[in-house]
Image (cartoon, coloured by chain):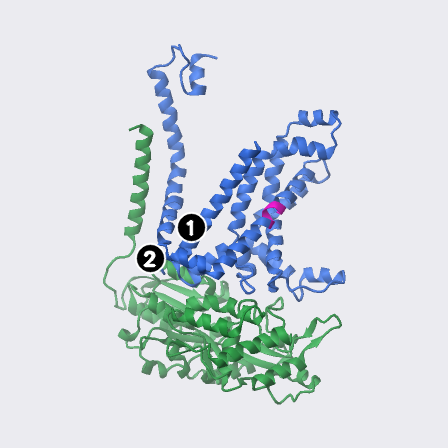
Chain colours: A green, B blue
Amino acid sequence: MSRSKKILQLVAVGALTALALTGCSSGGDEPADTSTDAKGTIRVLVANFSADKTGQAAFDKIVDIFHKSYPNIDVESDFVPYDALNQKISTALAAGDNYDVISAGIGWVQPLADLGAIQSLAPFGVTEDTLEKTVYPSFVAPMLWDDEVYALPVVANPRVLAYSKSAFEAAGLDPDKAPQSFDQLREDAKKLTIRNDQGDITQTGFDFWAPPSNYRQQFVTFLGAAGLNPFTDGEPTFNEPGGIEALQLMHDMITVDKSSTYGYQNSAKTALVESGEAAMGFASPYVDCSADGIGDKCDDLVYFNLKDEREVEYVGGRIAAVGDGSAFPDAALAMAEAFQDPDVQIDISKMDVGVPVGIDAGDSDFVNSNPATTFAWQNLDKGVFEYGGATFLDFRAEFGPSLDQVILGQADAKETLDRLADIARD
Amino acid sequence: MTATESIVLRGHPRRGSTAFGPRARGIERAKARAGWILLLPALLHSVIFLAVPTIIVVWLGFTDARIAGQGDFVGIQNYVDLIQDDKFRRSFVSTLLYTIVVVPLGMAIALAIAVGLNQQIRARGLFRTLFYVPVVTSAVAVSAVWLWIFNPGAGLANEVLAFFGLSRSGWLTDPHIALPTLMVVGIWQGLGSKMIIYLAALQGVSPELIEAAKLDGANRWQVFANVTWPALAPVQFFVLVTSIASSFQVFDLVYVMTQGGPANATNVLTFDIFTNAFARLHIGYASAETVIMFVFVGVMIALGRLAQKEEK
């Protein structure tokens, strides 16, 4: 055999050996250290904390609370946007180096539990009963998988509806009467839409506040108003007649009536009803009524819920869970619980445009600081959530673009929702 | 030329030479060893970070893995499902369309700019720099600026249309226009790198040939068509191959600007792979899709090479 061939063989063996050693170097079956004197490092994956001083300050507060119980455990953070969350989790699991604490969205609980990325909190004494004593009751069900609690709710991210009283008056509508049914909403939106001579909208009748491929939460709101949840007992129910009606309404308002411009957002990406570009629409659960914010516009806004068959408010939210296989499970739980501290919830709410889920948060200065947050918190009990079983992430990836196709008139609402239901069941 | 020099140049002894012996063979072996030693780091890198992951991806394509390394063997089921997957077919077509438009247009415009900047014009250095700036600018920053330009409400593009009395466009929110809009950005971003390569190649065009052609009465276009263009042939192939490969792998523009929307209008292959792998957590399925893309790009490059050989 020639020398060069021998050298090639050695190189191949060396590379494969290096790879094998890398594969063997991670993981292990060391017993979990549960003492409060434990020393080590826990890794925390945090979705959607702003990557600036505000986000870091909020996280540092959580760490300070954690260190009161576990002073000798270091905390290593990983801030990611929601879009990158799955990549981080899947690569961590593939490398056998899962995070100790994962803070994600409500919809992630069941898929992550099914994937083995997070562990049940039942062995730690966290049950539905204990959770109901501390958080808004409607937030308990989304934390469950196989009838056990797998995550702790941290903050709610509702989307509220608002309209402008002055715009209603100008359109000849009663400013004290918010639209309730789908028909009323559609008719009011048509009357509120103003166009210039070229036919371009100068005042949007109803703003969905959604970029392209992101009409999911808006559809869930309409679905809830039609009396349905996206999933019931793990089965998709969004494709029932009420769901088809809700999606058809969105298509009619956007593509037929053109009382909303599909996918339009202003350059600041704020809700158009808050900036005065829309008469009515989805809005943030926090509004700055100071001169630096929307100022006097605050007094012009009225917050309301849709109520075709049921009065609802769309609610998303953030959770904190303990990673499966954590070497410090008790410490990881303490870290997750630190996210639930009332002051931390308020900090995260300010940063992440949300409201605290603590059962006593209604008395806080933050919740009472502006009409949007007060309204959002008071209506958490009417929440319709976007979550649904182990296939949720799979289905969620298809949901947005599929809704777009119906909204734009490229696909039939029933066929699309039935197809999505099949994906959700797979 | 000495016999030894002959050996060095051609690697084998001339007939009847007295220089073929142990010393010559030792020199050859030393040169080969030096070559392998110099090649070793790159070879190791390629094996560890290219060859091994490629083999893993090919293997994962035959499994139903949700997370890398955890899945059951399913044979060619992923490939069967892909062929029946409407979203995959559409993303393939979108990628093909994107490549068919961006590559030739990008090459033509870059060549025109290179020819222009090869002339003795004022501020030539400044223009060359300006054209190259997009290449070294972060794709995210580029995308963010173009997002503003194409904002349907307050963007520069619609203001220009309005100035000329034309109706406003949805641009990236219009499913019929979103992909062509991305093509504009893709062409713009790739101009600089192609321009630099063409500029370098233009320096190698023989000035004597150009002068001879001019003396024979050739006009500028005839000089370009009969002297410059043939001289650029090797470079054309390189630019073509790299452009095809990069167009097929377009991801960052789509990720930042449209997320594959609206209504999957800009869902290209790489973004579809990304969605399947990291949004839907279907690693096996995404791996099969990656293999298909890899094979297709390889076929296109091979065809390009064949076309080039036929031209010669």
Element type where label 2 sits in the image: loop
**In the rendered structure, the residue with mark 2 lies on which chain?**
B
**In the rendered structure, the residue with mark 1 lies on which chain?**
B
- Asked whether residue B177 appears in the rendered view, the answer is yes
Category of crowding for the residue at label 2, using alpha-carbon neighbours closer than 10 angstroms: few (below 14), some (14–19), many (at least 20): some
The residue that label 2 is drawn on is B74
Mark 1 to mark 2: distance in Å? 16 Å
User: What's the amino acid at mark 1?
Assistant: Val
In the rendering, at what x and y percent does residue B308 appear?
55, 36
The residue that label 1 is drawn on is B291
Q: Quadrant of residue A200?
A: bottom right
Q: In the rendered picture of this protein, how many numbered marks are placed on residues?
A: 2
In the rendering, at what x and y percent does residue B163 appear?
76, 61
Q: Which residue is drawn at the image coordinates 53% and 86% (left, top)?
A: A308
Q: Quadrant of residue A340?
A: bottom left
In the rendering, at what x and y percent does residue B290 appear?
43, 52
Q: Mark 1 or 2 closer to N-term?
A: 2
Q: Which residue is drawn at the image coordinates 40% and 74% (left, top)?
A: A388
Magenta stretch holds residue A143: no
Vertical position of residue A312 compared to residue B306: above or below: below
User: What's the amino acid at mark 2?
Assistant: Val
Q: Which residue is drawn at the image coordinates 32% and 56% (left, top)?
A: B69
Q: Nearer the viewer, mark 1 or mark 2?
A: 2
Which region shows up in magenta?
A: B101-105
Which residue is at the front of the view, A377 or B9?
Answer: B9
